[in-house]
Amino acid sequence: MKRLPLLKPIDDLEDAAVLDPAVAAVRKGVNSVLHPQWLRDVLHGVPIGHALHPLLILAPAGAWLSAAALDLVPGTEKASRMLVGVGVISVVPTAAAGFADWSELHPQQQRVGLVHWAVNLVATGLYAASYVQRRRGRQLSGKVLGYAGLTMVSAGGYLGGHLSYAMAAGANHAEDVPHLLPDGWQPLAPLDDVPERTLQQRYLQDVPVLLYRRGDRVSALSARCSHLSGPLAEGTLLEGDNPCVVCPWHASVFEIETGEVVHGPATSPQHSFRTRVVDGMIEVSLPG
């Protein structure tokens, strides 16, 4: 079955450079408001290991869908109005998490994301108006506005799905590494060919591996950032007792020893290889 032709305009949004001035203005505003790093990490979902935004979407979408169902049942006006209000209020943290993620995407993704936000903004406005009408006792117009809002939310949800799945925004871009490599220990590079205390990249069967050497001790990570595949070997090294690497594209920070995320926007850790030196050759193996 072929894809519906009416969806082509969504693909065209990716190359709609006319949106770039608006994207730049909104991104500047987002970065000025969501400034503390700890706040951005929470909104990205670093503590829970994946994006927070999809979880928060359940609150407004669930409340509004429930209100739409209750609007078909006589005598449920008060409960339906409460759900509409809960949905409007819960948009605030949901949008904050979405904006945090959106501000760290590629330009094509940000264009689609901007339209996604605009559609959801219209939906929220319709639901806010629906709540006001319901409070005034104008149930019919409140319901009509609610169903119009649900239609817009559905359209915004489709754009969000396009971003997440078709454009891979928020996906773990390092997930495939274990599936591309053989099991067991694999030779990677002579120890003497790897300078100490610098970021070095080598390839294991076309898979880039990031190396960091201190004497005979070598740490190895998958070298493409889990956020959006940024080249970690071109990033910044943060030395100290626990060395870290900063992605050059969106400034995600990872521990070199473990691959764990220190700061987002990445939420998935880098794959960390076991390492050993045998007859002067660095060998690596993925755990499990």
Image (cartoon, grey):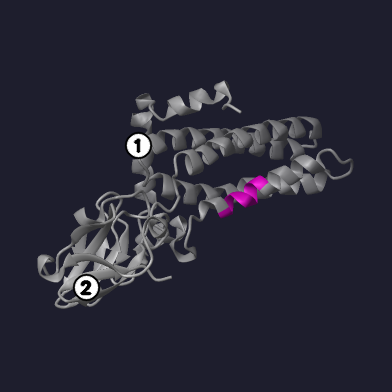
Above or below for 133 versus 220: above
Q: Are marks 1 and 2 in contact (CB under 8 Å)?
A: no
Q: Position of residue 75 (x, y in %)?
A: 89, 44
Query: Please, what is the dominant secondary structure of the magenta stretch?
Result: helix
Is label 1 or label 2 in front? 2
Residue 278 belongs to the span the image colors magenta: no
The residue type indicated by label 2 comes to Val
Dot 2 surroundings within 10 Å: few (below 14), some, or many (20 or more)?
many
Q: Position of residue 36 (x, y in %)?
A: 36, 59
Q: Secondary structure at mark 1?
A: helix
Quadrant into which the N terminus falls: top right
State the residue at coordinates (58%, 47%).
91
Q: Is residue 50 left or right of residue 240?
A: right
Residue 56 belongs to the span the image colors magenta: yes
Dot 1 surroundings within 10 Å: few (below 14), some, or many (20 or more)?
some
Residue range (magenta) = 55-61
State the residue at coordinates (37%, 62%).
182
Q: Secondary structure at mark 2?
A: strand
Q: Residue 239, can we see it?
A: no
Q: Which residue is mark 2?
A: 218
Q: Is residue 193 left or right of residue 244?
A: left
Outermost residue to the right: 74
Q: Which residue is mark 1?
A: 107
Q: Residue 189, can we see it?
A: yes
Instruction: Work out how far the residue at label 1 is from the one at label 2, CA to CA, in angstroms.
Output: 36 Å
Q: Earlier in the sequence, mark 1 or mark 2?
A: 1
Above or below for 192 versus 153: below
